[in-house]
Image (spheres, rainbow, N blue to C red):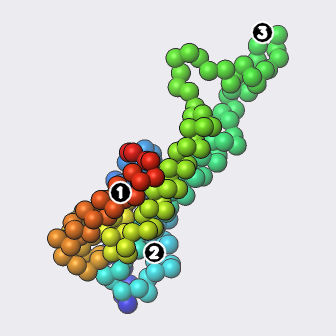
Amino acid sequence: MATEKELSEFLKSVERRAFKRSVYHVRNEESALDIVQDSMMKLAEHYGDKPANELPMLFQRILSNCTLDWFRRQKTRNALFSNLSDFESAGEDGNFDLLETLVLDGGSERTESAEDSMRRAQILREIESAVQDLPGRQREAFLMRYWEEMDVAETAAAMGCSEGSVKTHCSRAVAALSRALTAKGIHL
């Protein structure tokens, strides 16, 4: 079980890298700081009694989940609320027409069509299913390396194996995913 000092030292050691990773993902320093702080609090509250060698993997998972939660909240917030300044502008006659604010200019970016959105969601479900079908060690190595963005040495330490084993597990996982997705007609 990790002591309070070990937990504190661990959090200090990952703080800067976690912040940089979060800033890279959310492109906002204040939000990134909130995500990292929430992650650290959740680790301390819920997993502070775990052994010190399990903390890196737990923290990476918590940080990823907090980042995904932030994106979900942003998506919901953006879907529910529109920029209030859009509603303040009225035409010359003083009337406001919401449809006029929604007309896209020819040069502006278009939103994703429902068909494209559905296709993307189906592909993501197929990828998730293929990842779940991987053997445990391959799935673990693949997720740590490519989802958690841990380097080979960190992944090896978290998995308790050699760096060569991590590379082997990742290589086999990528090959298996490629075969499974190609068989389903998905080419990435």
Q: Nearer the viewer, mark 1 or mark 3?
A: 1
Q: Secondary structure at mark 3?
A: loop
- Inter-mark Cα distance, 1 to 3: 61 Å
Q: Mark 1, residues whose alpha carbon is within 10 Å: few (<14), some, or many (≥20)? A: some
Which picture quadrant has residue 152?
Answer: bottom left
Reading the chain from its start, which is encountered first: label 1 or label 2? Answer: 2
- Inter-mark Cα distance, 3 to 2: 56 Å
Q: Residue at x 56, y 38 (%)?
A: 116
Q: Secondary structure at mark 2?
A: helix
Question: Which of the labelled discs sits on residue 43, or is there none?
Answer: 2
What residue type is disc 3 on? Glu
What residue type is disc 2 on? Leu
What residue type is disc 1 on? Arg
Q: Residue at x 64, y 48 (%)?
A: 76
- Inter-mark Cα distance, 1 to 2: 37 Å
Question: Which of the labelled discs sits on residue 105, or is there none?
Answer: none
Which picture quadrant has residue 28?
Answer: top left
Q: In the picture, which quadrant includes the N terminus? A: bottom left
Q: Which residue is mark 1?
A: 179
Q: Position of residue 120 (x, y in %)?
A: 52, 45
Position of 178 compared to 46: left or right? left
Q: Which residue is mark 3?
A: 92
Q: Position of residue 94 (x, y in %)?
A: 82, 14
Above or below, 132 against 160 in this view is above
